[in-house]
Amino acid sequence: MIYWAIRMREKKRSKSIIVANWKMNPVTLAEAKKIFTSTLKLAKSLKKTLVYVAPPYLYIPNLVSKSKTVRIGAQDGRSEDFGAFTGDVSLKMVEESGAHFVILGHSERRAQGETDGHISKKISTAISLSLEPIVCIGEPTRDVNGDYLRFLEKQILGSLSGLSSAFVSHITIAYEPVWAIGSQSKGAMDPRDLHETVLYIRKVLRTKFGAETGDSIKIIYGGSVDAGNASSLIEHGMVQGFLVGRASLDGKIFGEIIRAVENPRV
Ligand code: PGA
């Protein structure tokens, strides 16, 4: 556990991360292997960027067995190890399957009733199991009065409630404004607005957990990241990587996103 903690801290200082959130795609294992093979090729020569892939649960063991450079994780997991929870999968099972990380609190899970309380419990369980939590936050809408900032603060403090600074230093925050996610959205946010929001998130983290912990937490962005906007989001947005949905399933587009993060122009 101590070795893991040191390794995590070092990694956080040095590398950007790109998380591929495959959601409920693709339909067959054969397709999953094909997408994964192209992702592996893209990730092989990277020096400053780590690539993470979160496939549906069923594909995890197969992809784990193929992966050295790319980290495999789950899109959710239950905090109880086992029990009468029809249809669910526990974080313990995720860890047993060889996964390295877990996405928690995605807005599509929150929309199905997941609360900040559930998420803080899951974070604590994940860290105890040495699964790295990627914790999603994001406002449903923007308003001119700045209410979305209060929403974000409440969501951050709620999702991380009851966690010590030592625990919190292991997480990555994925800021994903809900209005920017998916094909029906308005598209990715403006990089300068992202910069401003990241500064605010950082302030909330520093105030709650102290400057050292607050600064050590990696913040990445998600919501309609694609080949056309990745460079400006990474160069002006002040984020240390991306959580990518749709575009992570297309080798060519995902390759361009990876290159933008690995070699920013500034
Ligand atoms: P998108 O999804 O990139 O397809 O907008 C991002 C996410 O929901 O994680």
Image: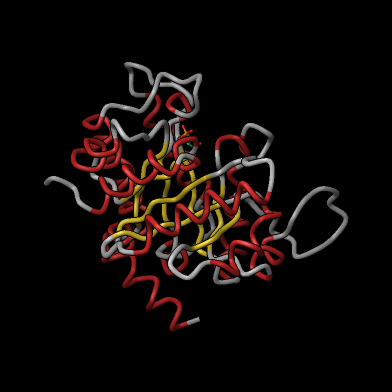
Q: How many marks?
A: 0
Q: Position of residue 48 (x, y in %)?
A: 26, 62
Q: Quick one: 175 or 156, which is closer to the camera?
A: 175
Q: Residue furthest left?
A: 266
Where on the picture, by quarter, is residue 114? top right
User: Which residue is found at the position 43% from the left and 69% from the top?
Assistant: 166
Q: Residue furthest top?
A: 144
Q: Does residue 160 appear to the left or right of 97 in the view shown?
A: left
Q: Residue furthest right?
A: 84
Q: Does residue 99 appear to the left or right of 40 in the view shown?
A: right
Q: Position of residue 230 (x, y in %)?
A: 29, 38
User: Which residue is found at the position 48% from the left and 53% from the top?
Assistant: 134
What colour scheme was applied to this rendering of the protein? secondary structure
Q: Quick one: 57 or 159, which is closer to the camera?
A: 57
Where on the picture, by quarter, is residue 175? top left
Q: Quick one: 141 or 249, which is closer to the camera?
A: 249
Q: Position of residue 144 (x, y in %)?
A: 32, 16
User: Which residue is found at the position 29% from the left and 41% from the top?
Assistant: 198
Above or below, comparing residue 211 to residue 221 in the picture? below
Q: Position of residue 130 (x, y in %)?
A: 55, 71
Q: Does residue 62 appear to the left or right of 220 in the view shown?
A: right
